[in-house]
Amino acid sequence: MTASSALLHDGMTAVPIPVQAQLFAEGLRLRRADGATQDWPVASLREIDRMPWELRIARAGAAQRLVVSDPAMIAALDMALAPWRKDEKAARWRRAAVTAFAVPLLGATLWFGWPPLADTVARTVPATWEQRLGDSIAASITQGTRRCVAPQGVAVLDRLSTRLAETAGLPTAPAVQVLDSGVVNAFAAPGRQVIIHRGLIYAASSPDEVAGVLAHEFGHLYHRHGLRNVARAIGVGAFVSILMGGSDFGAVAATLLVSVSYTRGFEAEADDFAADVLARSRIDAEGLARFFERMAGRGPRGSVAGYLDTHPDPAERATALRARRGAAVTMPALTPEEWLALRKICATTAS
Amino acid sequence: MATASFRVHDRACSRMMAGEDAPNRDMLDQPPAHAPALPAGHAIPGQPMAWGGREGRLFGIFFGNLLLGVLTLGIYRFWGIVRIRRYVWTHLAVLGDRLEYAGTGGELFRGFLIVLLLLVPLWLLGIAGEFLRVLHPWLAVAVPVTQFAILLFLLAAGRHAARRYLASRTIWRGIRLVVTGSPWRCARVQFLWFLATLLTLGIARPWGLAAEARWSLGRLNLGTQPFIFTGRARQILRPFLASYILALLSVGAAGVAVAVLWQSDAFDTLRQMGGTPAPAPEQVAIAVGKLAIASLGLLALVSPLLMLAWFSFAAAAMRWRWQNLAFGGARLALSDVTGWSVARLQLGNLFLMWISLGLLYPVVVRRRVEFLTRRLWAERYPDVSPARQAVLGQLNAEGLANILDAGGAGIGL
Ligand SMILES: [Zn+2]
């Protein structure tokens, strides 16, 4: 048995009560100056905190606290508390093990579960809203750059896109416009907007290549990729930024990483769509494949920037397209006269 | 105020009062420079709080949290906060008895999830706004304003909920602290004061501060024994108006200076750049240099004045909050809280966080705690005998204030 004086906080008042504490094998007996005693069984002892000069303990589930500063008593209580401390430690390890299992599981669920959920949300957006959103995005992009409006070229482009859109079964007629800019690029905004830069038409060596790019962009329109991408990215950004406690850096990094991996899926889907539409329009998909290969020659290959580029590897895309190419008879997408007219579409420009 | 403290006097007294067998805690190790328990009625001014933590230990916990946070995709955050708090609380002695922190990471995590449920509709409103602004131009303004208003309201409610939660998990001598009052009512009051402050161009601020103090300090209890807050807005009206006028004058002076610059020949030179005859490059360089020096000078002149206005009022408000607080018959006071000391604390903390990208957080915690413990005085030893343990209902954890980073480390108590 160890005995010492101690201070009792009785859990009802804030005035400390001096007590005599006696530690037996069964438990702790506290005796007040007025002779009243109370017993705390060993199994009910809990450590609140342990300082080199002071040990504070509680009775399980009770508000009472006992402050002990006698070194011999602290040592004796340390022994009595040892089994409980061991249990606590084991419980901590169990929790760590569960966490080590649950966190990756949760991450995987979100990673694979979020895209379909975001797509569902995106699908509830009415087509007219999507169109207005896309139109305003397109307007903000084309602002400040002149549009190419040479009448013959526009007529050829309209005929080609109408033909492809009808084969593709797009719900709304696309609005295709050419911008007077040397960038080799084309993209689709949500709704019906497709924007092609003059540089892309100049870089194409045959009308099949332009037709292929158009069909690819129509694939983005058909699958509503623009809107779905916005829905996914917003969700990921918000989730990560909340989880990280408002750290923008983490949110931006995660959004980038996720949108890269998601966008790759979209590009493959649009390529598939293009291959299908081209085949049904009797246009050779070889044009699009060759265009991708040419793009591969331009980009910084194998570099980090190349890897992080949101578009997948052009060589792989070309291979995938060729694999889907049928043996059917094909015709050039445009006659030589039409092709010439399209290439001169920027002879007249308007703001 | 006298420099005599509980620490000095109380040790001698405690030995006498506690008798031979009482634990003589002064002799052991080097604990927080804490004052041992004393009987009520002790009439010498003293410092009721003492900090005995070590920065090194805080760093250990902090870096452990950081590592586990990364490994768990940030979810460990809540348990990490608890570890930091537990260390701070247990090394903070009040009248010689160390505080106890009884919150858990699970509670914080649950509170966080509840807050998410509250924030998701708000976030969806924001996204809907992105689409709606295409439909009607005026929605481009209405949606963000509504969103901001709702957020402000939630934040005010969250702040009070956080106070209630934090108090209920703080135990002193076995008795829990209690903050009363509904968070929603608190939010309504705060929101109205915010609007009033906005509409009166800031003039209503002292009354808003008084309302805030009544809702925080004025509703604080140790168990059933209340802290008494008697502060009135008119008591801080004078320092407020002084700061307000100083701020107005310095902004006005800046406006005049900008107007003068605008008329200067340096600007004329720049304005002629597009036209004919174009000014010579060296003339342009001189003009740009002149303007740069002038605006730097302006900044150097105006920003200290603005900071003086800001920090001197912050210090006055802080002194006012504590000076009008009493517990157990003892009034509290802050010594040596001046605009300069508040500026040193807050700018210093900002600077430390900034140069270290947040890695010096433990230093900031220590500085905040020590700022208070070194300056807080009680006119006498408070009588805590009326305090009884209060019966608590269920409380939600403090998520909102935490997410939106308004709660700080919660050491303001
Ligand atoms: Zn694409």
Image: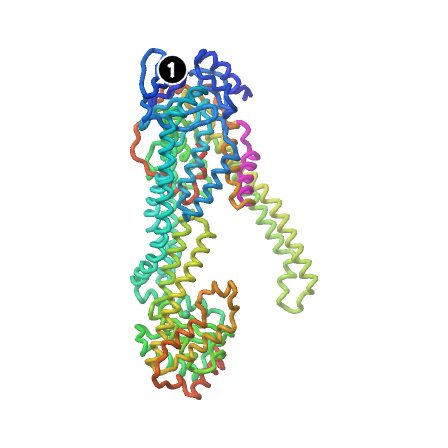
In the image, residue A209 above or below residue B274: below
Main structural element of the magenta stretch: helix, strand or loop?
Answer: helix
Q: Quadrant of residue B102?
A: top left
Residue at 44% over, 59% down: A256
Image: magenta residue range: B335-354
Percent x, y for residue B115? 35, 45
**In the image, is B365 to the left or to the right of A208?**
right
Q: Is mark 1 within 8 Å of ligand 1?
A: no
User: For residue A193, what is the image quadrant?
Assistant: bottom left
Tag 1 residue: A20
Picture coordinates of residue B113 (x, y %)? 34, 45
Q: Quadrant of the C terminus of chain B?
A: top left
Q: Look at the image and name its color scheme.
A: rainbow
Residue B324 location, x and y as percent?
45, 27
Q: Looking at the picture, does residue A169 appear above or below residue B128?
A: below
Q: Amino acid at mark 1?
A: Gln
Q: Quadrant of ligand 1?
A: bottom left
Q: Dot 1, how many residues are within 10 Å of its Cα: few (below 14), some (14-19), or many (20+)?
A: some
Give the residue at x 45% y 11%: B20
Which chain letter matches label 1?
Answer: A
In the rendered image, the quadrant that contains the N terminus of chain B is top right
Report the number of discs: 1
| In the image, residue A276 lies in the stretch drawn in magenta | no
Q: Is residue B345 magenta?
A: yes
Question: Eyeballing the image, is A245 above or below B60?
Answer: below
Is residue B245 visible in the rendered image? The answer is no
Q: Whole-percent x and y of residue B225?
A: 36, 24
Question: Along the line of sight, which residue is nearer the eye, B332 or B393?
Answer: B393
Query: In this view of the protein, which residue sits in the foreground, B21 or B44?
Result: B21
Element under disc 1: strand
